[in-house]
Image (cartoon, coloured by chain):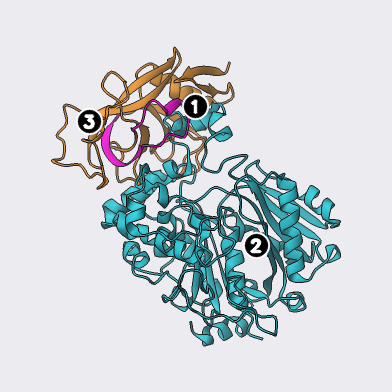
């Protein structure tokens, strides 16, 4: 069965043939961030894919991954394109280097996982929170439920982590 | 520019069909908002203009290529309307970076004997129908499967998708918004000398950095214009091109949709402040037999000010990380050492998914830029090389051009063209 959900007024659909995405988002709905690990390479990959980018191996298994990391780069949107986000501006999309597998298998590679900057409760971050987040900020994952079998990974500032004195921000506020 | 490098390119080698094919005709519609015409009518108009430019009739064209994102009309209608009987056609999916890639495909199918002459067109109502910026119809569609990983986060439009690369370049190399604004300053100067440009106003660095933020680091004036238009480029073998009405622009090298690793989600493979030109340059320059230092005019895709800068840097026009200095130094302006996008490009002339930059460089190589300079008794433009507002746009002695096409940070295309040495 396809999984359909409505999120902020947007119709999200995972086709019943799309096993990789069905699995990924179902694990998220269980609060379990899992990535595929290639059988031959032992390397994790993101986003879900049908083979291993390093070995072309089609065999993989889902492995739970600690979803903590550092902001590698970001988008801060002030002019919304999608109607769903009109009420949310400004909002941030973070591209986060997971600690797991950072710099592997080559120095500039990382599992760079996208998500919005949200509060620990999953609400979109306020402008004040946004202004304190930039490249270098330590974040952890939280999940936003779309349906019972489908949740979106999101990012929130990791209150337990040591934070940089001043994360790098675009110079104009 | 060194003449010796052109001669070397033309005489030394069979390498990858260097110097064997040419652009023999170019044409476009006007650049408007609110065309009140179908993409079929626009496409027909542009292809006919390119045929007229080449001095060709319907019997002389037997191949057709087009690209679109489901926002155009297929080749069959355009060819049918113009009475062109096709021996080959193909309509491919794609946007920026398609232009140079399709020129390469045209060379390949002609070389394979499938046809003799290929008209490549892009027709779009990019403002009044399917908006290129992603608003309207593009943002209203259901979000399915793999798209959930970005669109569900409000990460959809081109500016939003590319922003992590742009910001990371600022972080990695200290590039400033003021430096990058130099691209808009240059292209707007060029557009002010282009009677057909949609925006002809000249802008300053202050104008750019004080315009409203769309998504950081992009201000409104860092983003290109959305317009309704069609454009066409006709490719044929050099010997045939020499029989055409206008001088050929000789194709020295072409790279098509060259990608970074992990093109399913290129941000997985760093450095993310490096773009596909880093890989494409190793095909482009050896095949052309010249290097960036030999080039007189560039056409680096300006969907955004940043895309122009990133490509010039990764194709080797300056050292890695020094793109901000390069684009703010005056080099890329008319009158500078290597002007970029002399038509005003996507930022100012109009948005064509890359076509107008190749059209412009074809005209530069002919010495027949369509500026406001007077036409002499021989019917040719008498260029003044006075680049002040409303003046000349022709680059003096332009003999080698480079086009750098962009789809996204992870995918690019490129082409080197030369003035016919004959």
Horizontally, is B311 left or right of A121 in the view? right
Q: Is residue B192 left or right of residue B107?
A: left
Q: Position of residue B103 (x, y in %)?
A: 65, 62
Q: On the picture, is B377 further left or further right than B196?
A: right
- Residues shaded magenta: A67-90
- Judge if badges 1 and 3 mark residues of a common chain: yes
SS type, badge 1:
helix
Indicate the colour of chain B: cyan
Q: Is residue B312 above or below residue B142?
A: below
Q: Nearer the viewer, mark 1 or mark 3?
A: 3
Residue depicted at x 36% and y 53%: B208
Task: Report if residue B247 is visible in the image.
Answer: yes
User: Is residue A81 shown in magenta?
Assistant: yes
Q: Position of residue B191 (x, y in %)?
A: 51, 63
Which residue is denoted by mark 3 in the rendering? A128
Label 2, secondary structure: give it: helix
Task: Read off the residue under disc 1.
Answer: A21
Question: Is disc 3 placed on a helix, strand or loop?
Answer: helix
In the picture provided, is A168 more to the left or to the right than A150? left
Dot 3: within a 10 Å radius of its alpha carbon, few (fewer than 14), some, or many (20 or more) residues? Answer: few
């Amino acid at each position: 069965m396809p999984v359909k959900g409505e999120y902020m007024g947007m119709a999200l659909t995972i086709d019943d043939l799309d096993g990789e995405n069905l699995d990924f988002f179902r694990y998220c709905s269980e609060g379990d961030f899992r990535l595929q690990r290639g059988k031959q390479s032992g390397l994790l990959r993101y986003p879900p894919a049908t083979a291993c980018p390093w070995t072309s191996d089609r065999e993989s298994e889902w492995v739970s991954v600690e979803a903590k990391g550092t902001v590698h780069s970001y988008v801060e949107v002030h002019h919304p394109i999608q109607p769903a986000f009109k009420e949310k501006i400004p909002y941030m999309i973070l591209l986060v280097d997971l600690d797991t597998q950072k710099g592997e298998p080559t120095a500039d590679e990382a599992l760079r996982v996208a998500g919005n900057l949200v509060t620990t409760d999953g609400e979109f971050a306020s402008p004040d929170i946004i202004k304190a987040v930039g490249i270098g900020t330590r974040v952890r994952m939280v999940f936003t439920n779309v349906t019972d079998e489908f949740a979106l990974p999101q990012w929130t500032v990791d209150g337990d982590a040591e934070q940089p004195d001043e994360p790098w921000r675009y110079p104009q506020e | 520019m060194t003449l010796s490098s052109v001669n070397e390119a033309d005489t030394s080698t069979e390498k990858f069909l260097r110097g064997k094919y040419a652009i023999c005709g170019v044409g476009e519609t006007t650049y408007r908002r609110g065309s009140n015409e179908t993409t079929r009518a626009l496409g027909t108009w542009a292809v006919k203009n390119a045929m007229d430019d080449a001095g060709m009739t319907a019997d002389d064209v037997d191949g057709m290529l087009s690209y679109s994102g489901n926002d155009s009309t297929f080749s069959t209608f355009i060819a049918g309307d113009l009475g062109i009987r096709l021996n080959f056609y193909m309509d491919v999916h794609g946007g920026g970076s398609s232009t140079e890639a399709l020129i390469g495909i045209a060379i390949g199918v002609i070389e394979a004997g499938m046809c003799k002459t290929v008209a490549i067109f892009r027709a779009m109502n990019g403002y009044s129908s399917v908006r290129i910026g992603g608003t309207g119809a593009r943002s209203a569609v259901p979000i399915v499967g793999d798209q959930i990983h970005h669109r569900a986060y409000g990460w959809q439009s081109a500016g939003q998708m590319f922003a992590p690369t742009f910001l990371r370049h600022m972080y990695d190399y200290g590039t400033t918004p003021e430096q990058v604004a130099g691209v808009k300053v240059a292209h707007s100067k060029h557009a002010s000398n282009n009677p057909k440009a949609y925006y002809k106003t000249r802008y300053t660095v202050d104008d750019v950095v004080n315009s409203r933020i769309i998504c950081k680091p992009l201000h409104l004036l860092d983003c290109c214009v959305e317009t309704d238009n069609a454009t066409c480029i006709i490719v044929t073998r050099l010997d045939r091109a020499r029989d055409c009405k206008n001088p050929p622009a000789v194709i020295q090298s072409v790279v098509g949709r060259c990608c970074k690793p992990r093109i399913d989600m290129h941000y997985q493979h760093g450095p993310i402040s490096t773009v596909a030109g880093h890989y494409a340059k190793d095909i482009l320059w050896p095949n052309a037999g010249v290097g960036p230092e030999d080039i007189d005019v560039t056409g680096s895709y300006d969907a955004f000010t940043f895309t122009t800068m990133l490509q010039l840097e990764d194709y080797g026009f300056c050292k890695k990380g020094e793109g901000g200095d390069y684009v703010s130094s005056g080099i890329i302006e008319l009158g500078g050492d290597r002007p970029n996008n002399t038509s005003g490009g996507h930022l100012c002339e109009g948005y064509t998914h890359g076509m107008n930059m190749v059209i412009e460089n074809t005209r530069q190589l002919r010495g027949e830029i369509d500026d406001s300079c007077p036409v002499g008794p021989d019917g040719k433009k008498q260029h003044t090389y006075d680049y002040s507002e409303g003046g000349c746009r022709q680059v003096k002695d332009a003999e080698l051009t480079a086009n750098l096409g962009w789809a996204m940070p992870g995918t690019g295309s490129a082409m080197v063209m030369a003035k016919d040495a004959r």
